[in-house]
Image (spheres, helix red, strand yellow):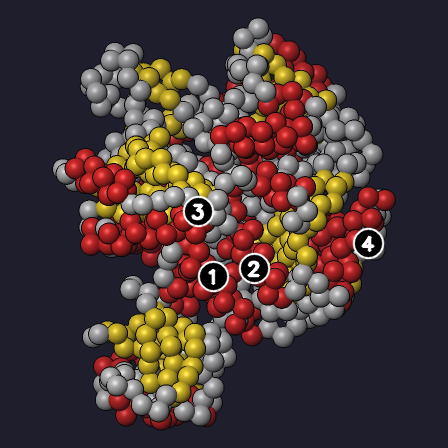
């Protein structure tokens, strides 16, 4: 009996065994092929992970209904990695695969398409006589028909008009949709209709007629002609050539190697990446280069396109439409010519064969850690991929993750350093401004900082102003009851966005009109406290707007209008003189005209209840400082702080990464934090309206204390720093051990014990957590 093991891509995500029908016995049903299988009284999609043969089976086995692919969608190496992830993260294999697969490739909206272009719905055949399905299946085997998915492309709705909008104040649905698009960015039309009701389709059409929105499919055209036409106008520095000479042999000899490229900002790491990719292409190998954000990935994509004219280059990220992601995924699964893949985190799961080089640029960035659903880190997946394909894996950063650097200095991975900028200019001079002695006198700026901004602009140079907090004001204070306005769904303050006159929760997306009656006392008497990027932009425009042009780059401007390319391009070309932004403008970008960087509030994030807080602050500020002085003129950096005694400032001021790391390592060893131990965070979420939540947590606490453990430290469960999030009360246990095995074993016992409590409590395990809030 010919059998296959299939992993379901829908709940319960389990593995089941099916019999291959006689009609399909001569088909090569390999692992990685999608299939439709029966589960109880329904049909669902699964992935073949194994085929085998048994003479006799003691129980009845259902038959496979239909294979969707003739060639595997997933590689053998990918399936092996998925198995490893499943074991490591204690999640079902089917959940791993479904989390990384474009949803369009998991849809059951499938059709038989004949040579005349006629489509026949497969699900309808499944409801009729099996002979009808078998007849078409025979035609599919012979190549007379093919299986296609629903051809309708996703329609993306983009807001193209800033507030105030020409709609009536009592038109609630219209305002809700406009505010949703403004705060969340472009959305699928089907998603908006599902969220706001069937009449929202009519609303969208009226917006389209008024010019408030536009529809698009977001499709790109990719070149398919392979011609190596490299730009030859690049001159390598001595350091760049030395690094390339070390790395190229690993690609040539198919040697698996992991390398940390630690180079100061402006040392020319991107050009090194391009030479490594060039060598991979010459050897008929694929390359993957990942970046932490779409804005940065886009600029790298444009540069790579210029360097590699006529090469297959794919740009893959989460803002692409579902249909486009599916198209790239399928194309790469069948590709026979070498390609370059550029993208963000999710691109690591594309079915790319014969990989020569994998590059993780800005490897320290926390965006490489997925915090929802499948909690993986790109570094770990990239390491497994490179090991499978005997590839070169390069981690690049001016401020590497402490764990990566610790591995390098302990010779677990190779360390290469670049200490000079390609221009030969020194790193910028950094001044720490004590706001206690030099308080803000010009909006959010002290006298010395404001004067330096004015002087820089008068000299014809550009300025970057960093404030890692979006909105107009992060706190709104009621003067009547002296309470801060908090989100009704979360235990966090709401941020005031002046441009749309709304309060917005940056965690759950809740929107409230402003001004409004205070939820505590009912008064309408508020003072906005503290500063966000909107307020800084407003002040800068008031002071300099008549003479200089100003741009803002943060998540609001990016998601709302998708104008990051225009913002970065315009600023880089010198058409604007001031760029106000969050951490989005801090890394990777090359702005030759910038000679001054100002950090409005260097203390943001420094004292969060997270052992990585100081490291993240150091990385952010050193990175943004690196945007200054990359052209012909030297650069300056001013960082304002109210906590000048903190130990991090001396290392930031001197750009002393190694000194900072040694200081931080001593603290972490003393307090037992990574890289000296392994961490796991066991999170418990209970609906806010569940009356017995305290009793349930006490029961969990009692059970935890009864579990025997010899090599594991358990702290908690205790309320999370953000206790209520999206109407869920949150508790967490911090787990410490010498390896992940005791942490997984402990978590597995908790999962098993409370597997029947799913309607009351959600439990998940986050290994090596990046966010402790």
How far is mark 1 from mark 2, CA to CA? 9 Å
Look at the image and tell me in which quarter the C terminus lies. top left
Image x and y of residue 373, in percent: 38, 52
Q: Earlier in the sequence, mark 1 or mark 4?
A: 1
Question: In the visual, does 145 lie left or right of 760?
Answer: right
**Mark 3, secondary structure of its residue:** strand
Residue 102 seen anywhere in this rendered image of the structure:
no
How far is mark 1 from mark 4, CA to CA? 34 Å
How far is mark 2 from mark 4, CA to CA? 25 Å
Question: Label 4, on which residue?
Answer: 245
Question: Label 1, on which residue?
Answer: 84
Question: Label 2, on which residue?
Answer: 384
Q: On screen, 772 above or below 545?
A: below
Q: Earlier in the sequence, mark 3 or mark 2?
A: 2
Q: Are marks 3 and 1 in contact (CB under 8 Å)?
A: no
Furthest residue toward left: 691
How far is mark 3 from mark 1, CA to CA? 14 Å
How far is mark 3 from mark 2, CA to CA? 17 Å
Q: Earlier in the sequence, mark 1 or mark 2?
A: 1
**Mark 4, secondary structure of its residue:** helix
Between circles 1 and 4, the one closer to the viewer is 1
Q: Are marks 3 and 2 in contact (CB under 8 Å)?
A: no
**Mark 1, secondary structure of its residue:** helix
- In percent of the image, x 79 and y 56: which residue is there? 231
**Mark 2, secondary structure of its residue:** helix
Image x and y of residue 174, in percent: 29, 42
């Amino acid at each position: 009996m010919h059998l296959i093991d299939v992993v379901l891509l829908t709940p319960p995500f389990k593995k089941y065994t099916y019999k291959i029908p006689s009609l399909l016995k001569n088909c090569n049903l390999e692992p990685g092929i999608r299939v439709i299988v029966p589960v109880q009284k329904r049909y669902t999609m699964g992935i073949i992970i194994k085929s085998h043969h048994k003479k006799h089976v003691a129980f009845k086995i259902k038959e496979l209904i239909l294979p969707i692919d003739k060639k595997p969608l997933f590689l053998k190496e990918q399936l092996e990695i998925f198995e490893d992830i499943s074991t490591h993260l204690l999640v079902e294999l089917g959940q791993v695969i479904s989390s990384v697969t474009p949803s369009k490739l998991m849809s059951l909206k499938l059709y038989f398409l004949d040579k005349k272009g006629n489509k026949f719905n497969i699900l309808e055949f499944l409801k009729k006589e099996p002979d009808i399905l078998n007849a078409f299946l025979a035609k599919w085997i012979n190549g007379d028909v093919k299986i296609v998915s629903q051809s309708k492309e996703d329609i993306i709705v983009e807001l193209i008009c800033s507030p105030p909008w020409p709609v009536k104040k009592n038109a609630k649905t219209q305002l809700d949709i406009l505010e949703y698009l403004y705060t969340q960015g472009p959305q699928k039309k089907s998603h908006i209709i599902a969220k706001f009701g069937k009449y929202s389709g009519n609303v969208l059409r009226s917006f389209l007629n008024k010019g408030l929105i536009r529809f698009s499919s977001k499709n790109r055209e990719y070149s398919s002609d392979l011609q190596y036409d490299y730009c030859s106008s690049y001159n390598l520095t001595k350091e760049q050539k030395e690094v390339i000479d070390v790395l190229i042999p690993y690609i040539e000899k198919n040697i698996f190697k992991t390398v940390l490229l630690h180079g100061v900002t402006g040392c020319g790491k991107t050009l090194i990446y391009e030479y490594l990719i060039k060598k991979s292409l010459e050897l008929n190998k694929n390359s993957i280069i990942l970046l932490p954000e779409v804005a940065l990935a886009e600029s790298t994509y444009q540069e790579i396109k210029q360097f590699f004219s006529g090469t297959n280059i794919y740009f893959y990220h989460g803002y692409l439409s579902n249909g486009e992601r599916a198209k790239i995924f399928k194309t790469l699964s069948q590709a026979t010519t070498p390609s370059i893949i550029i993208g963000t985190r999710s691109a690591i799961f594309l079915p790319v064969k014969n990989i020569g080089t994998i590059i993780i640029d800005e490897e320290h960035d926390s965006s490489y850690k997925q915090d929802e659903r499948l909690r993986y880190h790109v570094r770990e997946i990239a390491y497994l991929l490179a090991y499978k394909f005997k590839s070169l894996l390069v981690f690049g950063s001016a401020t590497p993750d402490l764990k990566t650097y610790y591995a390098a200095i302990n010779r677990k991975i190779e360390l290469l350093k670049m200490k000079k900028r390609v221009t030969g200019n020194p790193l910028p001079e950094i001044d720490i401004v004590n706001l206690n002695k030099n308080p803000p006198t010009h909006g959010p700026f002290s006298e010395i900082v404001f004067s330096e901004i004015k002087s820089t602009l008068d000299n014809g140079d550009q300025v970057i102003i960093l404030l890692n907090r979006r909105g107009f004001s992060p706190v709104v204070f009621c003067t009547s009851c002296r309470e801060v306005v908090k989100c009704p769904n979360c235990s966090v303050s709401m941020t005031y966005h002046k441009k749309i006159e709304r309060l917005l929760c940056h965690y759950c997306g809740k929107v409230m009109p402003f001004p409004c009656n205070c939820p505590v006392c009912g008064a309408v008497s508020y003072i906005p406290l503290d500063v966000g990027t909107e307020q800084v932009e407003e002040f800068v425009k008031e002071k300099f707007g008549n003479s200089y042009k100003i741009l803002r780059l943060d998540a609001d401007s990016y998601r709302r209008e998708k104008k990051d390319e225009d913002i970065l391009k315009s600023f880089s070309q010198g058409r604007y003189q001031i760029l106000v932004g969050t951490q989005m403008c801090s890394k990777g970008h090359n702005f030759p005209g910038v000679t001054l960087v100002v950090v409005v509030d260097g203390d943001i994030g420094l004292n969060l209840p997270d052992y990585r807080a100081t490291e993240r602050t150091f990385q952010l500020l050193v990175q943004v400082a690196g945007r200054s002085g990359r052209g012909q003129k030297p650069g300056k950096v001013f960082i304002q702080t109210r906590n000048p005694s903190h130990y991090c400032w001396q290392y930031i001021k001197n750009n002393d990464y190694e000194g900072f790391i040694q200081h931080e390592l001593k603290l972490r060893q003393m307090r037992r934090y990574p890289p000296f131990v392994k961490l796991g965070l066991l999170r418990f979420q209970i609906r806010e309206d569940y009356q017995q939540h305290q009793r349930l947590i006490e029961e969990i606490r009692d059970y935890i204390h009864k579990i025997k453990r010899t090599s594991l430290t358990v702290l908690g469960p205790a309320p999370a720093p953000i206790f209520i999030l999206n109407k869920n009360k949150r508790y967490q246990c911090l787990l410490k051990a010498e390896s992940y095995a005791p942490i997984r074993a402990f978590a597995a016992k908790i999962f098993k014990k409370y597997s029947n409590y799913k309607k009351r409590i959600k439990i998940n395990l986050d290994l090596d957590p990046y966010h402790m809030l």
